[in-house]
Amino acid sequence: MLKLEDSYLHKGKRRELIRTLRNKGISNEAILEAINNVPRHFFFDSALLSHAYEDKAFPIGEGQTISQPYTVAFQSELLNVVPGEKVLEIGTGSGYQAGILYCLGAKVHTIEFNKTLYERTKRFLPKIGVKVKHYHGDGSLGLPEQAPFDKIIVTAGAPVVPKTLLLQLKIGGVLVIPVGDRKQQQMLKLTKQTSKKILKETFDNFSFVPLLGDEGWE
Ligand code: SAM
């Protein structure tokens, strides 16, 4: 059962988490503020509740995870959302990253492959005031019916950069995606400078669950 109570203890733990994220190099105040405003423990099963403010990934069922707060903050910094931008998130999972993007003022479209997680998160996010558009399907192919997007964030590890995601970006748009093998991926930021020119920037390694589907692992 989810506990939708945000106590002084939880708020204190969030402030501590924010100090940890600052120490690890996260400096975007809007992102730190969003992390302060979205109670991460709401996204946890009661058995794991006491771990909600550790800077770690945790299971959310269906063999999937809620990303580590540092990873959420790092990807959000690279994405650099401007309020009002149309953002596609691939891999809804628990809905936590979607909640952070919503707090940053994005118009969020989020797609999840796993039907159980899709249904659960679609029911849950409105209960905590997070309004985003949910889709069930293979996000490795993007979301052509809603394209183009200002920004696309992939929250599962991809074997390659799916070309179709680049096609679904506006000119000037940004794709943030971890790419590598099944165990470790390098974070990439791809900026679509013109329809033919992509600026690729590379960052640290991370460890995500695999991106499935046609342009994913299977
Ligand atoms: N963003 C999530 C959060 O805040 O909880 C964490 C996502 S979890 C690390 C990765 C998610 O990507 C899983 O829920 C998984 O089912 C989903 N996924 C994997 N392949 C996918 C695909 N092709 N399309 C959409 N979702 C996919």
Image (cartoon, grey):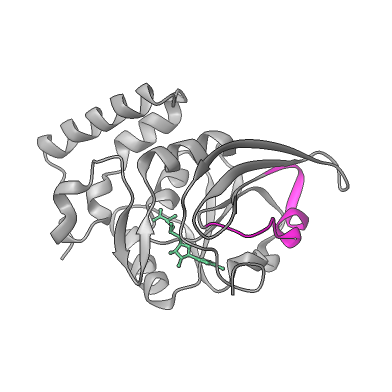
Task: From the viewer's side, name the closer residue of 217 and 174.
Answer: 217
User: Horizontal and vertical percent for residue 7?
Assistant: 11, 40
> Is 84 above or below relative to 59?
above
Decide if residue 156 is on the left or right side of residue 150.
left
How many numbered discs, if any? 0
Decide if residue 56 is on the left or right side of residue 181.
left
Q: Residue at x 35, y 37 (%)?
A: 35
User: Horizontal and vertical percent for residue 108?
Assistant: 52, 53
User: Horizontal and vertical percent for residue 6?
Assistant: 16, 44
Q: Residue at x 38, y 70 (%)?
A: 117
Decide if residue 146 is on the left or right side of residue 199.
left
> Is 204 above or below relative to 180?
above
Q: Residue at x 39, y 26 (%)?
A: 24
Q: Quadrant of the C terminus?
A: bottom right
Decide if residue 148 is on the left or right side of residue 178.
right
Determine the image quadrant of residue 36.
Answer: top left
Task: From the viewer's side, name the closer residue of 218 and 113.
Answer: 218
Q: Residue furthest bottom?
A: 115
Start-end of magenta stretch: 157-174
Is residue 164 visible in the rendered image? The answer is yes
Q: Is residue 164 magenta?
A: yes
Q: Residue furthest right?
A: 196
Q: Is residue 32 magenta?
A: no
User: Horizontal and vertical percent for residue 116?
Assistant: 37, 76
Q: Quadrant of the N terminus?
A: bottom left
Q: Residue at x 33, y 50 (%)?
A: 57
Determine the image quadrant of residue 212.
Answer: bottom right
Is residue 81 visible in the rendered image? The answer is no
Task: From the viewer's side, name the closer residue of 178 and 110.
Answer: 178
